[in-house]
Amino acid sequence: MCDLMLCTLILLSASTRAASAAEPAATALTRDQALAVLKLEEGVWDAAIEFPPASPGAAPTHATGVQTNTFVTGNGWIRNDFEVDAKYGGHGTWGYDSKKGRYVGIWVDSNQDYIRLDEGTFDAKTQTMTWTSELRQPDPHPPAKYRMTEAFRGDMRTLTMTAIGAKSGREVPLGTIVFTRRR
């Protein structure tokens, strides 16, 4: 059960994400402004992961991992490679779409059979990135909404993952990852 929970949560994570796709786009950023936000994630980060208890009264599950974020040629996009306890691997790419006025990204990993598409916004005042996406569920269930909120605090980032029930609208905590930049 722990491995299933670990796999489910980690496949959702990988990076940062923000703001609902239904919300209007924010004022478009300049290339330099968008790049400054991406640079907050650049580098190698140690990850401490905590998943909620699988059942009432149970303890949370913990894992560790390493995330490496590097810019692709031209510095417009950042590539993410994420490995957790040699059981999980994921890869993403994201950047800023000036036409949408949002950050956009893709994510694939060892637990998914599809490419997840993400959209996000950055709140400069709170130094928080919020991403939204859609999570496929086993048939016959409709996709769930997925939100990742990441708070940047210098050499530490905290990513909180939440699923939102398609029918109930109920928020379900999926896990938290605390990233610490390697020096």
Image (tube, grey):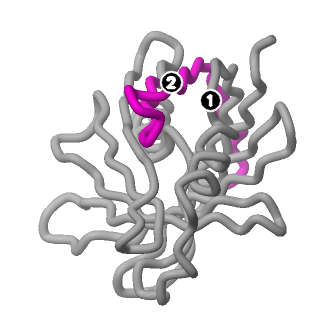
Q: Which residues are magenta?
A: 55-81
Would residue 97 be seen by someone viewing this image from the given angle? Answer: yes
Please name whichever residue, 140 or 122, is drawn nearer the observer in this view of the structure.
122
Q: Return the x and y of residue 167 as percentages of the image width and height.
A: 35, 86
Q: Return the x and y of residue 103 as percentages of the image width and height.
A: 47, 60
User: Please, is residue 79 above or below residue 106 in the view?
Assistant: above
Q: Looking at the rendering, which quadrant does residue 45 occupy?
A: top right
User: Please, is residue 75 above or below residue 162 in the view?
Assistant: above
Q: Residue at x 57, y 55 (%)?
A: 34
Quickly name the residue at label 1. Answer: 42
User: Please, is residue 183 above or below residue 37 in the view?
Assistant: above
In the picture, measured across the screen, residue 59 lies left or right of residue 64, that is: right
**Quadrant assignment for the N terminus:** top left
Is disc 2 in contact with disc 1, using a CB cutoff of under 8 Å? yes
Task: Tell me, yes or no, whether the highlighted magenta stretch contains residue 60.
Answer: yes
What whole-number distance in Å separates the C-alpha atoms at marks 2 and 1? Answer: 6 Å
**Quadrant assignment for the C terminus:** top right
In the picture, measured across the screen, residue 40 lies left or right of residue 138, that is: right
- The first of marks 2 and 1 along the sequence is 1
* Residue 70: image tag: 2
| Residue type marked 2 | Thr
